[in-house]
Image (tube, rainbow, N blue to C red):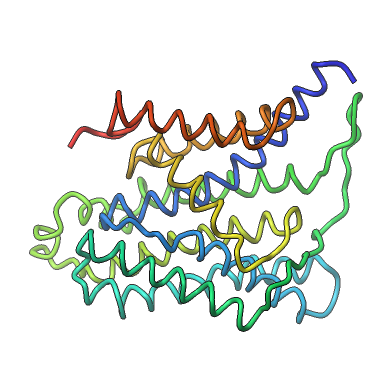
Amino acid sequence: MDFGPFLLLALMEGLVMAAVLALTAVGLSLVFGVMRVVNVAHGEFFMLGAVTAWFVTSWMPGPPWLGFVAALLLAPLAVAAVAALADRLVLKRLNYDPEATIVATIGLLYILQQAALSLYGPDARPVPAPFELRLQLPWFGYSGYKLFVVAAAGLVLLAVWLIMTRSRIGLVMRATQIDRETAQAFGIDVDRVYAGIFAMGAGLAAIAAVLILPIQQAHYLMGGDPLLLSFIVVIIGGLGSLRGTLVAALLIGLSDGVISVFYAPTLAKILATLFVALVLVFRPQGLFGAKA
């Protein structure tokens, strides 16, 4: 196969990664943008979504697509409920103090990880794709499910953008982000907004996990890479910037796909880390972030 088809394959693989990474990173960016909380447990919500999806698909009788649809609906709701509970029981009691919440979410990370190990076990387990479709291109065949992942992630991201920019809920969130005290003075229940944002961020990570599960496998330690890459994306794009997060996810995903095909996956991570260092030195607020 010539260079052109190899490059096309690398870009398509990178686009799948970028779509899943954008969903995960947008959840992390929303939590920081509105609540000013650095959620170190975000990767474990990703893992929890994958493990929950495996349980749902294992218990759901019928064809694979039925179990997958059920997992896509139930897993994000279950993870969002866990996140809202964690916000009420932990973060709210700390008054969302930046330093204290970092320590608290590190503790939450280990709690969720060990709970998954106890209930789920140490084995990596696959989930079947909801449909078998292979698109035959002139140079190679390609999974139709992977293209579905890109389309589904795009629709979810569009829904998030519409909520944040075109709905009353989004207006309340942005008002809380700009000035918490003034929002409270106007009768906005800031604690409820914060719980909703934290649940929404975790739910987005869970959706990303369910979508990638037929490509990867569910494992109780799978939250590390999504957390690291999400931090890389939000730092490059700008903490709290939805547009910057999407652009950075595309940049990291496509570059990772190309470099992994032609060189080595480790080199892609090294270059991404180097890019983060350059951004922090020359533009600390990120490519699209506002100056403090």
Is residue 96 toward the left or the right of residue 271 in the image?
Answer: left
Q: In this view, does 85 lie to the left or right of 259?
A: left
Side (left or right) of 169 relative to 119: left
Q: Which of 155 and 95 is in front in this view?
A: 95
Residue 34 in percent (x, y) is at 28, 54
| Residue 119 in picture, x, y percent from top left | 63, 83
Question: The N terminus lies in which quarter of the figure?
Answer: top right
Measuring 52% from the left and 37% from the top, which residue is drawn there? 249
Q: In this view, does 170 lie above or below 96?
A: above
Furthest toward the top, the residue is 3
Give the side of residue 226 with respect to residue 170, left or right.
right
Given residues 161 and 238, the one toward you in this image is 238
Q: Tell me if residue 113 comes above or below residue 132 in the rendering.
A: below
Seen in the picture, residue 250 relative to 19 is either above or below; the reply is: above
> Can I make out residue 220 in this image?
yes
Total labels: the figure holds: 0
Residue 221 x, y percent position in the rendering: 60, 64
Q: Residue, x 37% and y 64% (percent of image)?
A: 198
Q: Can residue 288 be seen in this view?
A: no
In the image, what residue occupies the spot 31% across and 66% down? 103
Residue 163 pos. (x, y %): 40, 52
Closer to us: 1 or 259 = 259
Considering the image in quadrants, where does the C terminus appear?
A: top left
